[in-house]
Image (cartoon, rainbow, N blue to C red):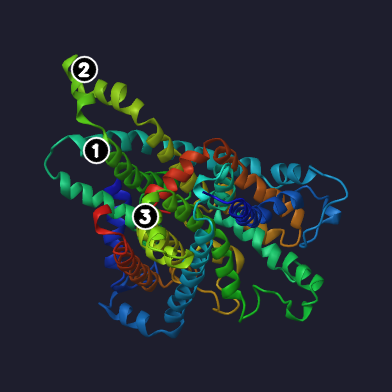
Amino acid sequence: MITRREVVLNYLVLGVFAVLALAPILGVVVTALTPADESSATFHLPSRLDFSNFATAWTEGHFSQYLRSSVIVTVITVAVSTVLSILAGYAFARKRFVGRTVLFYLVLVGLLVPFETYIIPLYYEMRSFGLTDTYASLILPQIAQSFSFGVFWMRTFFASVPPGLEEAARIDGASDRAVLWRVLVPVARPAIISMVMLTFMWTWNDFLLSLVMITSEDRRTAPLALSFFQGAHLTQYSLLAAAATIVALPLIVLYAFLQRYFIRGMLAGAIKG
Amino acid sequence: MVAVFLLYPLLDAAWISLYQWDGLSASTWVGLDNYAAALSDPELLNSFVHAGVLVFFYAILPLALALVLSAILQRGSRLRGIGVFQTLIFLPQVVAAVVIGVIWVSIYAPDGTLNAVLRVLGLHPVGRAWLGDFDTALPAIGLIGTWLEIGLCLVLLVTGIGQIPRELYDAARTDGAGAIREFFAVTLPSLRGSISVALTLTTLSALKTFDLVYVTTHGGPGTATSVPAFQVYNLAFNTGQVGMGTTVGIILTVLILIVTVLLRRIEPAEEV
């Protein structure tokens, strides 16, 4: 029923928008590969491909160090919040306990309220704990926010699993723990991967929290470092582009392999962000 | 965990917003004065107006464009290779706002790609330092948002259209509806859920804009691109008006909550 003309038109529209979305990102990669002496703000094809900008950004620009900070913060945040979210999501979906509703609403507050609202008191609180300028000052609030989202996400999923699955396992004498980790978690794998991807992305891309909490240069996360790098190398476009590429690359690689989960997560439950 | 690092600071925020405090010396109780001052300070009010302008560029413009396109792409979700396009169009969503800011700063630069393109088209008199001009800085940031969000809107709508039962279209056609009538009678109402989600996501990201402004203009030139989230940061950590900064944060949050509730109402009731 779909005519040839319509097919062509559809591909054309999709193609144009794919190019529009991609062009600035590909442009920055090409700029990053442009030799420093040919670098300019205007996009142009370089006479040869030069990888030295990456080397300069990586060593002299200290991006190896910044990336390490980002990896530490992101991996710990994602690992802890994932385990906690699975446990709490299961509890909220299946168990009755005192204050369940109230607690759930409290968790939801975290889902709706952005860092911008409470970043100021959070900063003073961290300072009173003596935690400012540590990785903990990034990891702890990030876990709290990710957990809010994760609990909501996992509870929704666990609540949608037919109880029959669990009952069968219980008849076989499985404990609560076994039911959760051996029966439910394997079923929930796609949901868990989506959650991990979103949490990873939010934590990796965070800027405000690091900007406020981190003062030492060697603890800067990659996006924060990029903004400082931009201030220092305003017109060295190819070097700046190399640094920008380094910051964005880990997520783009992850996205390339797991885009299905990313997109599903963003479309289904991405209230936070 | 949530209690210590999220709820406590939140309550604390409400409390601090009632004080005049520079973060160091003793604070003075001023009750609701901060709120009164915030709501009558032209500079702060302007930052909320700017956020409103960004909502147009981040939410309304991309959604309108995506709706027009989705009318063309009505059966697009059944095309072969749709997944690849979807992946590409969605890509900007996963790139850090700081990186996006850096990319667009060079595009908008006086000797940047945009001005070069205009020169080729013979439009060089229009060329300027887009982010340094009082008239164009805010729309320039807004258009970055449009670029960023259109993919999200498009993917949401095309997915939504894929879920509309074919029979509805067949029925409309039997009744003699043309393509345009069909769009308004069938497609648009069936997309209410997708539209609500798209508007909520994009509006919230417009209201919360901070990274992009920080990286591209720092709120300038003057205060031409200052937005509430930037004010929160600037007041508290640069000019020492901690109480006032917190107040702006609370007002922003209330606004976000109201907008979320309102936009969710577009969604058809049975899906809630």
Q: Quadrant of residue B102?
A: bottom right
Q: Disc 2 marks which residue? A: A174
- Label 1's element? helix
Q: Amino acid at mark 1?
A: Ala
Determine if residue B269 is in view: yes
x and y, in percent, of residue A79 in the image: 41, 34
Q: Is residue A48 left or right of residue A196?
A: right
Q: Is residue A132 left or right of residue A39?
A: left
Q: Disc 1 marks which residue? A: A159
Taking the spot 71% from the left edge, 46% from the top edge, the residue there is A57
Q: Residues within 10 Å of mark 2 (few under 14, many from 20)?
A: some
Q: Disc 3 marks which residue? A: B168
Taking the spot 31% from the left edge, 78% from the top edge, the residue there is B35
| Figure check: A44 above or below A138 | below
x and y, in percent, of residue B123 in the image: 77, 77
Nearer the camera: disc 1 or disc 2: 1
| Figure check: A146 above or below A91 | below
Q: Earlier in the sequence, mark 1 or mark 2?
A: 1
